[in-house]
Structure formats: C-alpha cells, structure tokens
Amino acid sequence: MMYHHQLQRIANPPPLLADYPEFVEPLPCEDRHLAPPVVDDPDGDLCVRAWRYWYNVRGIVEMENRLEARATAVVMVHPWGIDDGHGLVTPEPAGCAFFCTREKNRVCTRHIQQVVNPFLRRLRPRVGLVGYSMPLVEDDIRQLLYASVRTSPDTLQPEVGERRLRALLQSHAFTGKALSDPIQLDPDRPVRSYMEQTPSTDARTGYNGPGFWELPMPVHAALERDRDDRVFYDGEGYEVVRDYLLSRSIRHVLLTGYATDMCVISTTCGYDNLSRDFNLFLVGDATMATFPASTTPRFATQVALHNAALRQLITQVSWVR
C-alpha cells in the first residue's frame, strides 16, 4: 500500500487533550498538519482522529482514521482495585501500591468515573472486545469473577467470587514495617548511601507486608464492566493475549489505563507489545500517569503522552466516534 504524506497545515488549531483538564494538561501546539488516514478500512465505521509528533516535520501530524469497529478492541491496562472499597488497601504505615498513596488512588477513582466509564459505555456495543490486564495469573477467585481467555462468561459466579474475595481480604492485615531508623551512612558518600537505602518507591514485602502481592487483585470497583469483557493476566504472557485477540479477528486496539509513564508502556498489554501486532491508538485522556511530587496528574500525564507521541499514535476520548 503506497502512502503519500500530503500535509496540509491546520490554521489556528485548539489545544490537544483539552476535555479533562483535571487529569491531563491541555497541549498547545501551533505547528499542526493534517495528513491522509493511515488506517482506512473498507468497512470503516469508527472514526479515530489521531496525532503524532514528528521532528522532521517540526510539528504534529494528525489524520482521520477509519476503523472497522468489530475488528477493534478497547484494552485497559491495570485498573487495579486498591483503596476502591473492595477491601484491598494500601498497607500502613509506609506501604506503596498502584498510585502509591490512598489520596492519589482516589484521584484514579474519579478518573474512572468521569472519563473511562462513559467512554466504555459508548463504545462497548460497537467494538469487538473490551478487555483489562491484571497482575499474576488466573486464580480460583478471579475465575469466578471475570471472563478470560480460558474462562467463559457462562461459567462465572460473581456473587460467590465477591464473597470469597471479601473474606480473604478481610483476613489480611495490610500492615508492614515502619521506615527504617536509624540507617548507617557511608561517611565518604553519604548522599549515595542515603538514596540507596531509602529508594523512592519501595513496594516490597518489608513496607507492604508479607503476602500483599500474592493476593488476587480485583478489577477496580468503580469500573463499569460487562459480563462478556475479558481479563488478561500479566503472568500468562503477551503471546496469550495476542493470540486471543487475533482469534477474535481483532486488528486495531484502543489502549487506555494506568499508568501512562509505566505499565501502559511496557507490561503485558502495554503499547510496546501490542503495537507490534495491531494498529494501536493510545487514548491519551483515558490514561493517567504517576504524579509523585504533585497533587495533580495533569502535567505528568501530558509529558508522558507527548513522549509517547514520538512512537505511537495518540487519540482522545472525544476523537473516537
């Protein structure tokens, strides 16, 4: 297939990613160009406008892609159910999980409610598949709760699964050790030894307590799911996900989830994997980056997205229609 750039400069373009400024800072860029679609399915019934940043063009290149909706999957990376009411909580007094503090995890809950749920609600009747990636491998509790590559929706027993999950989580202490004090510093290199002994994100057994990472992580309680949605498990490998999507005749992926700067990139369903085998569009405002030193994810998410735009096509919720 021969592709011609045929760039047309866009006059006075509005900022990108401007619909949900609580979660992503709008991205102004005056040097924007419209190009022909990269994906133009003969039966295309799903319009996905997308953009990339291209240094050689010295600006942003946009295109209106036309996808066959039934050949499209919406995949959400790591909607972890921590501090969401399920009973799995950030360990005290110094544990780290998901966005690493209870306050930051509550921001994620708002993002699911305000951005992700309406997006999935609108697209689910049209697309071929909605799926979520979760940690570890399928276990006997989540097998009751979520359909997967191997588990049919007809076999689910969600009431039994929720009851068993609740009992298991209620029996867990969710406590770990306090900050180590005192620590011994190297007199010649005190800064180096201080930083080595106090890493910024220590989520290991010590601070998170024994058994935390072996618990069956639930899908976030705020996420509106359908019985036919699928859960993919990181521990079972990317090839399992790839082969299942191909068996469902999926050719395109709309990628959402957490966190834009980490798991959305390089975990089992991250874009480093999925973009090798599918036409991938990262739905920027349906993701959220980690924001360690800030009270808002908006700036960190914008940075993660314009970095991703160097090698992925970026879209946004309102551009998928």
Image (tube, helix red, strand yellow):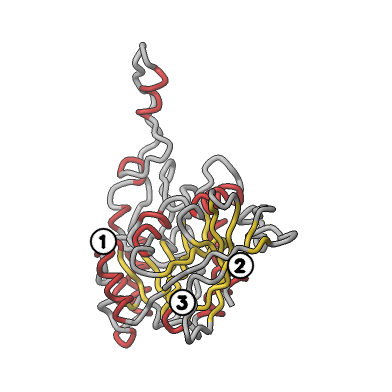
Residue matched to label 3: 225
Q: Residue at x 55, y 40 (%)?
A: 293
155 left or right of 130?
Answer: left
- How packed mark 3 is, by other alpha carbons closer than 10 Å (few <14, some 14-19, many 20 or more), is some
- Specify the quadrant of the image occupied by residue 276: bottom left
The N terminus lies in which quarter of the figure?
A: bottom left
User: x, y percentage for residue 131?
Assistant: 40, 73
Residue 252 point in image, percent of width and height: 42, 74
Q: Amino acid at mark 3?
A: Arg
First-in-chain label (2 vs 3): 2
How many labels, in total?
3
For residue 114, the mark is 2
Distance from the alpha carbon under mark 2 to that under mark 3: 15 Å
Residue ranking furthest to the right: 12
**At label 2, which amino acid type do we have?**
Gln
Q: Which residue is mark 1?
A: 235
Regarding mark 2 in the picture, which secondary structure is present there?
helix
Towards the viewer: 191 or 143: 191
